[in-house]
Image (cartoon, helix red, strand yellow):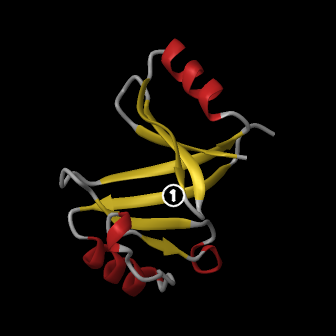
């Protein structure tokens, strides 16, 4: 098997509104929004089928991203650049959570990576 999708994010202008919307529509269990993490709340995988999160964008632009689990973040980012993509966030440790990275593909889709 290749690199599995292990997380998704729904980022928008108003994280509290997103939390209320997805809770009401899909009955997802979403944790408290953490102001120090961009008003980010984790979506419980038991309720949604896949771990995820809702959050607030710094620039006000909404986005949906998925995260693939890879063995080496930097090696994967090197492949991204070699194939026409761009690094948006280098490997960054989120204490107590994971080490993540973000890139955009040649068409501008934002995609996340997490270390396996």
Q: Residue at x 45, y 16 (%)?
A: 84
Residue that lies at the very extreme toward the top in this rendered image: 82
Crowd band around label 1 with a 10 angstrom C-alpha radius: few (<14), some (14–19), many (20+)? many
Which quadrant of the figure has residue 88?
Answer: top left
Image coordinates for residue 77, horizontal then vertical, percent: 55, 27
Q: Nearer the viewer, residue 41 or 110?
A: 41
56, above or below 100, in the image: below
Is 15 drawn above or below residue 62 in the view shown? below
Which residue occupies 44% across, 22% down?
A: 85
Q: Quadrant of the N terminus?
A: top right
The percent position of residue 75, horizontal first and vertical second, equals 64, 24
Q: Which residue is tagged 1?
A: 8
Q: Secondary structure at mark 1?
A: strand
Q: Quadrant of residue 87?
A: top left
Q: Residue at x 60, y 28 (%)?
A: 74
x and y percentages locating residue 103 in the rendered image: 45, 34
User: Is 114 situated above or below 46?
Assistant: above
Question: In the rendered view, does 41 fall on the left or right side of 76?
Answer: left
């Amino acid at each position: 098997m290749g690199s599995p999708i292990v997380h998704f994010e729904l980022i928008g202008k108003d994280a509290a509104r997103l939390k209320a919307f997805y809770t009401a529509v899909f009955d997802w269990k979403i944790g408290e929004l953490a102001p120090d993490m961009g008003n980010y709340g984790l979506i419980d995988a038991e309720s949604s089928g896949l771990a995820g999160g809702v959050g607030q964008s710094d620039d006000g632009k909404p986005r949906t991203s998925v995260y693939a689990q890879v063995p080496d973040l930097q090696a994967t980012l090197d492949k991204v650049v070699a194939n026409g993509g761009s690094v948006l966030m280098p490997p960054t440790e989120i204490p107590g959570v994971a080490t993540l990275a973000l890139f955009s593909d040649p068409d501008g889709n934002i995609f996340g990576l997490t270390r396996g």
